[in-house]
Image (tube, rainbow, N blue to C red):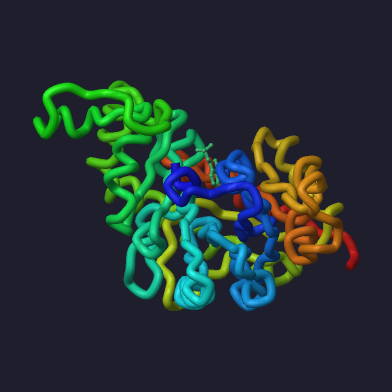
Amino acid sequence: MSALLLDIRPGDEVIVPAFTFVSTVNAFVLRGAQPIFADVRPDTLNVDEQLLPDLISERTRAIIPVHYAGVACEMDAICGVAARVGASVVEDNAHGLFGRYRGRLLGTLGGMATQSFHETKNLTCGEGGALIINDPTYIERAEILREKGTNRSRFYRGQVDKYTWVDVGSSFLPSDILAAYLYAQLEEWTTIQKKRRALWDNYLRELMPWAMQQGVQLPFVPDHCMQSYHMFYLVMPSLTDRQGLIESLRNRGILAVFHYLPLNVSEMGRKLGGVEGQCPVTESVANRLLRLPFYNDLTEGEQSEVIDAVTSFTCGPA
Ligand SMILES: Cc1ncc(COP(=O)(O)O)c(C=O)c1O
């Protein structure tokens, strides 16, 4: 919907981090846009804002920052670069609901922001999402697009006596049943976030000495960011160590998984001009990152087992 609202057309360029899920970029490629893959910062794994001035051009229509693991991107710098060429900023806030940047909620900083309620997220309805519109100029058309191109929302409000087809659109609305399932979690969001915060803090406290000894990188949250407690990841010293730890956890019945494969070297990314070596931080981190079990119902006992299994692992020689 955000790509439709921005009226993205063939030839337009959209800057996306190479370290993200395909949904971030698919929306724009479906409208014919050329994605420009940006590398990420080694500390937060968010798009490296310092690279943007070299990637932006008069063809850039949008920058899509992804708040990785719910830690904010450097939004002042990103919005500043976008404004210089009149490009829009659409936050991919799939991970970041309830996180903040300099006190402001993630999802409120770009012209638009997208949420995901996929099963891996803090709040979920299985498959689902939301579009947050901060720039009011998009609201009227958004109501039409999400209702299959009709002015049904105006009909519901009594502003027209029948509704009809007025624009392109699709069925972007979740079902009432899914919305109800999600709404119950929204009512309990403080409890959910408190629980996740306690689990996250516990991982950090318990794994820090091991990580320092083994040369393992833990998540970094800058002082001006409040994270959303979406994910706990480790960046291992090497691919061999990452695979070794995944295997060793699997042997103890614990599922730890890697994350995004760099978009620039994916099959589709290459067709769109991506090349190896284009995003060195992404390409290196993608080989070394793993996510530990982290979900709302994870018990303290289960988490202790995970911590025990992780700290029993020794990385190979550098
Ligand atoms: C950065 C990012 N964007 C989007 C999504 C999900 O998008 P969708 O809910 O459209 O599948 C995910 C993961 O599920 C994600 O990690």
Q: Position of residue 202 (x, y in %)?
A: 48, 58
Residue sitting at x 48%, y 51%: 95
Q: Closest to the observer: 109 or 178? A: 109
Using the image, determine if residue 14 lies above or below residue 100: above
Where is residue 229? Give x, y as percent. 45, 55
Residue 208 at least partly seen: no
* 203 vs 9, nearest the viewer: 9
Q: Nearer the viewer, residue 201 or 220?
A: 220
Q: Residue at x 84, y 56 (%)?
A: 275
Q: Is residue 15 left or right of residue 237?
A: left
Residue 165, by quadrant, is: top left
Residue drawn at the location 34% of the way across and 42% of the way down: 142
Residue occupying image coordinates x 69% and y 75%: 54
Q: Position of residue 294 (x, y in %)?
A: 52, 45
Q: Is residue 249 left or right of residue 173?
A: right
Residue at the limit of the structure toward the right, as seen here = 317
- The quadrant of the image that shows the N terminus is top left
Please say if 261 is above or below 228: above
